Image (cartoon, rainbow, N blue to C red):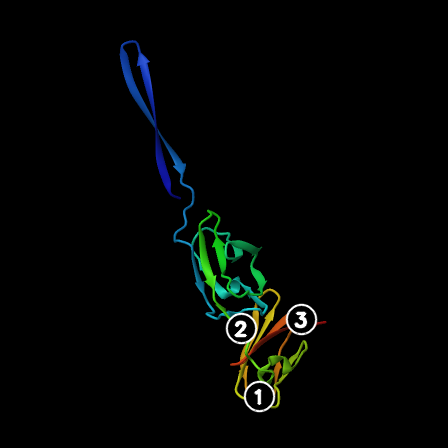
Amino acid sequence: MKLFYYILTAILSFCSLTSVAQTVVKMPLPPQAEQALEVDVLFDEALYTGIPSAIGIMGYDISGGSAPYSYSWLEGENLLKQGETIILIPASGKNYALKVSDKKKCSVLVPIAIIETNKNSSDKTDNSLWTTLLTSSSLYLKPPLDFEGEAEIILINMMGKRLLNTTIAGETEIAVSLSSGAYLLQLLTKDAQNISKHLIH
């Protein structure tokens, strides 16, 4: 334990004789953070405007400072939500950030990257034309007949935890193990992006 010494000085007068007495008192210093609060982004991926995305603190490496931490999700200077996760629908022209604060009110502001959704995508590349079926044990995906290329598939629970992130090039069935609840399925291709909500009973 770190200590500092506080010296108490008393003036004692006895007639014409004056003496000085000193008492040393040991007092504990309050605990200090060993390093500054730091927040690093683990997944350097942008969110698309107009598309709901579940994000959370599991996408960040938070260290230093004085625990416990608090989390604020911001649109510009406006508070959207406090907590570990958020379902964010980015708006065009807006700035978003995660603010992490520690017990001593030190804080770090981390911008959230946003990409404008491509509004020129034709029906040919509309991801809503995909066939998707999510159950507790499997995820089935079938692209349109004229689909070419690859699609990135991301499955997220409502706490913002990424359960699956893979790339497919055609009709695919993927084994999963899901409990009852709601899930977000994000489908990204070079021309379009789509997110859908699925309920497991």
The crowding category of the residue bearing disc 3, from other C-alpha atoms within 10 Å (few below 14, some 14 to 19, many at least 20), is few
Between tags 3 and 2, which lies in front? 2
Residue at which label 2 appears: 117
Q: Name the residue under label 3.
A: 179
Q: Nearer the viewer, residue 164 or 118?
A: 118
Image marks 3 and 2: residues in contact by CB distance under 8 Å: no
Within the image, what quadrant is residue 197 found in? bottom right
Question: Is 113 situated above or below 24?
Answer: below
Residue at image mark 1 = 147
**How many C-alpha atoms fall within 10 Å of the one at disc 1: few (<14), some, or many (≥20)?**
some
Q: What element carries label 2?
A: loop
Q: Which of marks 1 and 3 is nearer the N terminus?
A: 1
Distance from label 1 to label 3 (Cα)?
32 Å
| Residue 137 rendering spot, x and y as whole percentages | 66, 78
Image x and y of residue 173, in percent: 62, 84
Q: Mark 3 or mark 2, which has the lower sequence index?
A: 2
